[in-house]
Amino acid sequence: MASCTFSSDDIVIKSPNDRRLYRLIKLENGLSALLVHDPEIYPEGPPEHSKSLEHSEAEEEEDEDEDEDEDDDEDGAEGEDSEGEDDDEEDDEEDEEDEEGEGGDGELKKKGKGGASQTKKAAAAMCVGIGSFSDPFEAQGLAHFLEHMLFMGSTEFPDENEYDSYLSKHGGSSNAYTEAEHTCYHFEVKREFLKGALRRFSQFFVSPLVKIEAMEREVQAVDSEFNQALQNDSCRLEQLQCHTSTPGHPFNRFFWGNKKSLVDAMEKGINLREQILKLYRDYYHGGLMKLVVIGGESLDVLEDWVVELYGNVKKGPQVNLEFKTEGPIWKAGKLYRLEAVKDVHILNLTWTFPCLHQDYLKKPEDYLAHLLGHEGRGSLHFYLKSRGWATSLSAGVGDEGMHRSSVAYVFRMSIHLTDSGLEKIFEIIGFVYQYIKLLRRVSPQEWIFRELQDIGNMEFRFAEEQPQDDYAAELAENLLLYPAENVIYGDYVYKIWDDELIKYVLGFFTPQNMRVDVVSKSSIKSEDFQCEPWFGSHYTEEDISPSLMDLWKDPPEIDVSLHLPSKNEFIPCDFSIRSDNSCLDPANTSSPRCIIDEPLIKFWYKLDNTFKLPRANTYFRINLKSGYANLKSCVLTELYILLLKDELNEIVYQASVAKLETSVSLLSDKLELKVYGFNNKLPALLSKVLATAKSFLPTDDRFKVVKEDMKRTLKNTNMKPLSHSSYLRLQVLCQSFYDVEEKLHVLKELSISDLKSFIPELCSQLYIEGLCHGNLFEEEAISLSNIFKMNFSIQPLPIELRHKEHVICLPPGANLTRDASVKNKSDTNSVIELYFQIEQEVGIESTRLKALIDLFDEIVEEPLFNQLRTKEQLGYVVECSPRVTYRVFGFCFCVQSSEYNPIYLQGRVDNFINGLEELLEGLDGDSFENYRSGLMAKLLEKDPSLTYETNRYWNQIIDKRYIFDLSKREAEELRSVDKEDVINWYKMYLQQSSPKCRRLAIRIWGCNTDQKEAEARLESVQVIEDPATFKMSSRFYPSIC
């Protein structure tokens, strides 16, 4: 029997507001584990874990092993280097809502959280200190491939989908990702099933099967994942930087892996299975493993489980892998021009310096990132923007992969340029070096460090909780990075002021140590380009003249406009908790109350009494007069909002540094303004934002820049096939939908005088609906609403003048198809998105209908993935989910593939749907009950943070539903839903023999397919050639939101 060699309950430094208990243990095999007892998982107290209970659980597991339910993980959905996916340059910026939040199209996706009965899930994560830097050169992408293969069965649980099937049945999910120096696996599950999940999870690290036949299929999944990133400019740039790095350097490789890199290895006679097992044997041992388990059980019980289940992991020494490097990473004095996929101009400047992991208490790189990436007056960003050369600038050492490794820290400054900025690249770099010279001249400033220290400490002390599996993964990664005591605090801490270290790091910011990359569609003028071998991107390599290098090394002057930022006025100083000082009436605290209902403004309020943090979220939707009345007014309104955001940037940025955020976006005729974060300075920020908006009039120079940027954004819309398919579906479903190409055509003709004459009418009548939730008293909330009244003393916009969206009511038995080619003519990815329209959400039956849809999703999501991805390997994206489009229920199946055309994909999806009656009929009582109780647990799960709770309320407000406990009601409905109900729902809405089955297939054809195949039509299918014509003869549901 394995045992602990070390155990301590008082090592980890945690926030005084953190009620969780932490215990660090070490096993004889070298494995370190952080056990986290979360009292909110079992608020009524942890269960008694007697020997008999554990015995019955083991029997229950054996029964379940015999169930043939299906799935593979979304393993690696974050995938090697997938950071490129997240910072995709011109994608929607308004991405801060959680996944239950409403999309910009009035759509809800997935199931909302409930928060009603305050339960939480359990979770775990394992971080192994080996990643892509350890790939053998002859089999690149092997570490990532190994990550995929661990999901494909073990000696104890040989079924490929056992782990995910178990999680899926018990309200859980899993994921994994491979980085340069570590690989992380994590899951969450309904609280009672933590031990069963840990047992299956442990076998990843004890006895994976790595079967040849599974490898042959899963190499296709790795390839599909790579094909998802193939047209991503960020991923292409990163791979170019790897490709052009010094031969033999750890960077000089292909981290992703694809069919070519892995199958080529086999064709060269390399035994890939033996290579994978060697990588596993060499590195998957206790000394390189950090486990985190978050449960509601006592620390003693969690410790017993970990010792029992993970004691069999192979023993190994506690070491960090070291990678030998000599000389510079990149050649000096070079400029690389990379041909972009999207219409963008980005200047990337990159400097490298030695690893600073050991200096995490000083964070010199973050001090410099704060100044070089600042957006206030005197900053580089402010200066380049005022010259009309740049639209955005970011700077710093990335959190992931090769950017922050033991080999080097990679500091990147990324500047998005205007057309005129593209012509001034060398001048812009000159100004960057003027600012660097300024930093050297004024020497490091302790007051700036103290500001960052205060902000870090405040964030640590009042941190918002994350979803459990995200927190587990973060802690597991941090166990590899920091000493155990700082596993939480390490990310926040600025403990030691060291001006000499800052000067030392600043010494690396020289032209000789700089790499320059320009990413642009018009980057490459000549035919004389080179080809990066893995992504196939075109690039050129040029010499930068020595005279320029000398000029940058020591600029003769520093422009007077460049200076350090002023002190931050938004750093809070009052952290008192309002609910500690108020007499709470329980009737008033469970849901938001409407405290103002006037013709101009309707305002909802809830004092937070759950999280008790000095934070508040204030959200507003402002209907603008005629903002969406026609195509031209829609484009003018968008342009006005973009110019307003541009004007607000300096104020908003300063507040965001102090963790008080602002978001401004537009949805049809509604301006959505959100101000959220630490509440102390929130009223002051809202006042400044509204005063600026009130007096704002655009200038000619900013109009030109913002119009150019908007044109670029419109051109880049629908470049991703998955986004394109959703766009085309909504274009059919929504009565008012202005096409992106038509918007572009109108935009080109607009002048500043058009906009100036439009603004007074747009703002002449308004209607505001808002929510204040968090650490503010009711009278403070009322004073926020008065800021609106003070700034906008205008006529209210009557209800009949506010835009209402109508959704098409598809006719009985509808079987519609819409075909389109990929917008990016080099994209091989095809998509089938098969949408079933259900019913409009009206009447008391709608909650039951929602419960049936969500339960159906819960049951079929995993078998769909297992059949179409794991077994058939159609593509990396295989998913299904409920859709609520302006309160009309629907259900979607979606597959993206770089191998097969949409007609074949649709045939496979239809085949799966046709087999669902048998699958549902074959569910035994226990399995059905597991799915039902798993969904109920999800619906009743405690909101992880104030932000999640606010978003849940806000979705009720913007949908004009106002049922703030909808998830609780849905969970209640589920109690009386049985298997026959789900089967009848399926037969009624998804079986084509039923008149209530109404389908819309959106098919995006990749560049390697022949759309002519779409012409061989079935008689039963109606093809939509022109959505506008189709909608003219269609019926629409009444608007209810």
Image (spheres, helix red, strand yellow):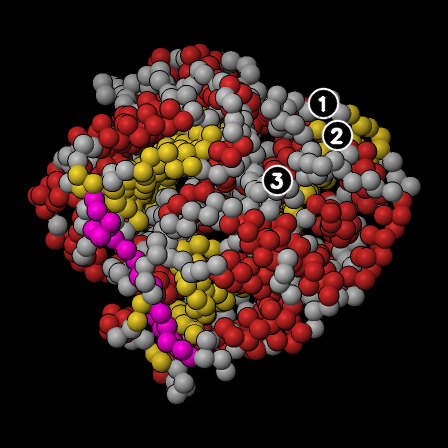
Q: Residue at x 59, y 68 (%)?
A: 982
What label sits on residue 24 in the rendered view?
2
Does residue 983 appear in the picture of this structure? yes
Q: Which residue is mark 1?
A: 11
Magenta residues?
Answer: 797-821
The answer to which of 866 and 964 lies nearer the viewer is 964
Q: Is residue 805 in the magenta section?
A: yes
The answer to which of 380 and 111 lies nearer the viewer is 111
Q: Which callout, 3 or 2, points to the residue nearer the camera?
A: 3
The local crowd at label 1, few if under 14, some if 14 to 19, many if 20 or more residues have their Cα within 10 Å, is some
What label sits on residue 705 in the rendered view?
none
Q: Residue at x 82, y 40 (%)?
A: 48
The earlier-in-sequence mark between 1 and 3 is 1
Does residue 217 appear in the picture of this structure? no
- CA–CA distance between discs 3 and 2? 27 Å
Q: Is residue 236 above or below residue 116?
A: below
Q: Residue at x 20, y 32 (%)?
A: 792
SS for callout 3: loop
